[in-house]
Image (cartoon, grey):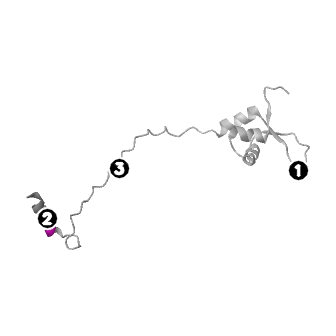
Amino acid sequence: MSNKNPLLNAKQVAKRLNVSLRLAQRLMQEMRTIDVGAGGKNKFLRVREADFEAFIRQRTKEPESPAPELTVAQPKRRPKLTVYPPLIDGRIPNRRELRELQKVQQA
């Protein structure tokens, strides 16, 4: 067999796809594989590199639409700071009392 098309085992497939060994073994069952085992219960599957590349091309999807343009988020407006007037007899003054306080402060 020529070295142009080497056979990949599950560990090599897992490394190339950056997935677990178990997932690579499951994915290899969907690929065109070669069983190099003795024909017993356990299979020794291998995948040709060309078949692996074809599998990747088949599973690759192009985006349906172009990626949206990224916009810079506007900073959130801070709520206005409410400054309460001094308490009158331990309570918050009502509107009439507030107006009177404002008149005194303006004068």
For label 3, the crowd category at 10 Å Cα-Cα, with few meaning under 14, some 14 to 19 and many 20 or more, is few
Which residue is at the front of the view, 57 or 88?
A: 88
Please state the total of marks drawn on the protein image: 3
Q: Which residue is mark 2?
A: 101
Going by the numbered disc 1, the residue's amino acid type is: Lys
Whole-number angstrom distance, CA of label 2 to CA of label 1: 92 Å
71 displayed left or right of 24 = left
Counting residues from the start of the chain, the first of labels 2 and 1 encountered is 1
Highlighted magenta segment, given as a residue range: 96-100
Between discs 3 and 2, the one toward the N terminus? 3
Q: Residue furthest left?
A: 107
Q: Look at the numbered disc 1 and give the secondary structure of its residue.
A: loop
Query: Residue 75, image x and y in percent?
Result: 36, 46
Given the image, on which type of amino acid does mark 3 rest? Answer: Lys
Q: How busy is the neighbourhood of tag 1: few (under 14 within 10 Å), some, or many (20 plus)?
A: few
CA–CA distance between discs 3 and 2? Answer: 33 Å
Q: Position of residue 27 (x, y in %)?
A: 73, 45
Q: Residue at x 68, y 41 (%)?
A: 18
**In the image, is residue 90 above or below residue 58?**
below
Residue 2 in percent (x, y) is at: 83, 25
Q: In which quadrant will I find the C terminus? A: bottom left
